[in-house]
Amino acid sequence: MTVTIAIVGAGSRGQFYARAAAADGRARIVAVADPDPARRALLAADHGLDEQACFTDWADLAAVPRLADAVVIATQDHLHVEPAVAFAALGYAILLEKPMAPTEPEARRIVEAIERAGVVFAIGHVMRYTAYTRAVKELVGSGRLGTIASVQHLEPVGWWHQAHSFVRGAWRNSAESGPMLLTKSCHDLDWLLHVIEQKPVGVASFGSLTHFRPENRPSGASERCVSCAVEPDCPYSAKRLYLGCLGDPSTEFWPLGAVTSDATPGGVLSALETGPYGRCVYDCDNDVVDQQVVMVEFAGGATASFTMTAFAPLEHRKTRIFGSHGFAEGDGERIRVVDFVTGGEELIDTRSGAGASSADGHGGGDNGLTRAFIDAVIAGEQGPLGAGTAEALAGHLLVWAAERARETRTVQAL
């Protein structure tokens, strides 16, 4: 069986999923819907789509007789609900980019539509689908570490990634997209639930926008990097970042692809002179946090702490797991395990060569999720994905509770 897939939202995430599906060999992209003609044309060219298979709006695609077995919805976060509900009712299997939706009522509306239609559903929690995660989950589930007492988990967002996506980019402002914990780190709270496999009962959180603020603007800085006297010494130089992408197909695709489709020095500089990605990081309308800590208590007594920070290299997540009979420490590729009985150590190596960033496919997670989704569509049931709407919603509920805790400086019961 060849699975046919329509892409709704042809930005970087939609293009990643489309390429991963085509590379799998068991799927074919048959339609695209996106209001941006350049993005729409690029995806159509990549997958040999004719004009009849290209739509300017998801509603236009939904209005014609069903064209595919499945749909990938990779629109902006606030545009997830309506297409998800509509395509579920039409019988499409759905792969929905994370987060599900900006608010709990919207997410529950999606869940209700999926369950009512009985279609296969995947959420873009790609971290679940890496070889590293499988190894960590197997280690915890095997009992080798004994009873899990606590977990420390770190997401190093990356200084330049924070500037790109969460200061200058589409996820910079909570009113336009959502809080940082939802738009970036819902991956991580879902991952903790997936690995620990206990029900969370309470959560607290602290975090703020500490650095990317007008009062931290260096003396002599301009509104744009292209005309700034202090730009050469600024860690967040847009000129250094985006001109440095030229010549590398992966970084030309992302992050540069969000800035301009003209991958030349002149094209980059022109975009930085006029577009949002050339702004000084201390002169944007951003309000999402640049660091946050979340603390979770589980029903079995275990605790977990999660730290998200902009102020680190963009690398794989780092995790320490403390058990009654053993200790594990992982860096996203390798896991060091210490046995408390023998004192012996083991190194579990899951390296695949895939880097941590979106350009690198999230350590193999993009391909892993896409492969599991195709498996599920072929099987006609949820099993190959290992998760469904309940699991997708659970991580989001923990995120929203943590945000309430941060905003009110309280402990939130779950």
Image: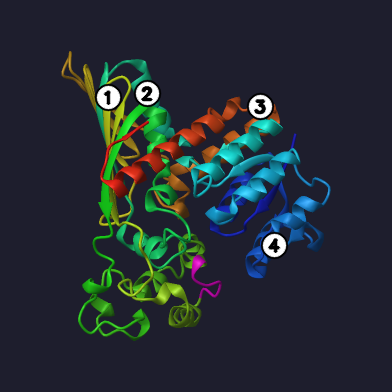
Say whether marks 1 and 2 touch (CB < 8 Å).
yes
Would you name the residue on which mark 1 appears? 302
Task: Give x and y (percent) for residue 229.
Answer: 26, 85
Picture disc at residue 381: 3
Query: Which is nearer the N-term, disc 2 or disc 4?
Result: 4
**Residue 135 lies in the magenta-colored region:** no
Query: Which is nearer the N-term, disc 3 or disc 2?
Result: 2
Which three-letter amino acid code belongs to the residue tagged 3? Glu
Mark toward the viewer: 2 or 4: 2
- Screen quadrant of the C terminus: top left
Mark toward the viewer: 3 or 2: 2
- Screen quadrant of the N terminus: top right
Say whether marks 1 and 3 touch (CB < 8 Å).
no
Q: Quadrant of residue 339?
A: top left
Would you name the residue on which mark 4 appears? 45
Q: Main secondary structure of the magenta part?
A: loop
Residue depicted at x 38% and y 25%: 199
Query: Which is nearer the N-term, disc 1 or disc 2?
Result: 2
Whole-number angstrom distance, CA of label 3 to CA of label 4: 32 Å
Would you name the residue on which mark 2 appears? 198
Query: Which is nearer the N-term, disc 1 or disc 3?
Result: 1
Say how the picture is coloured: rainbow
Mark toward the viewer: 1 or 3: 1
Whole-number angstrom distance, CA of label 1 to CA of label 3: 33 Å
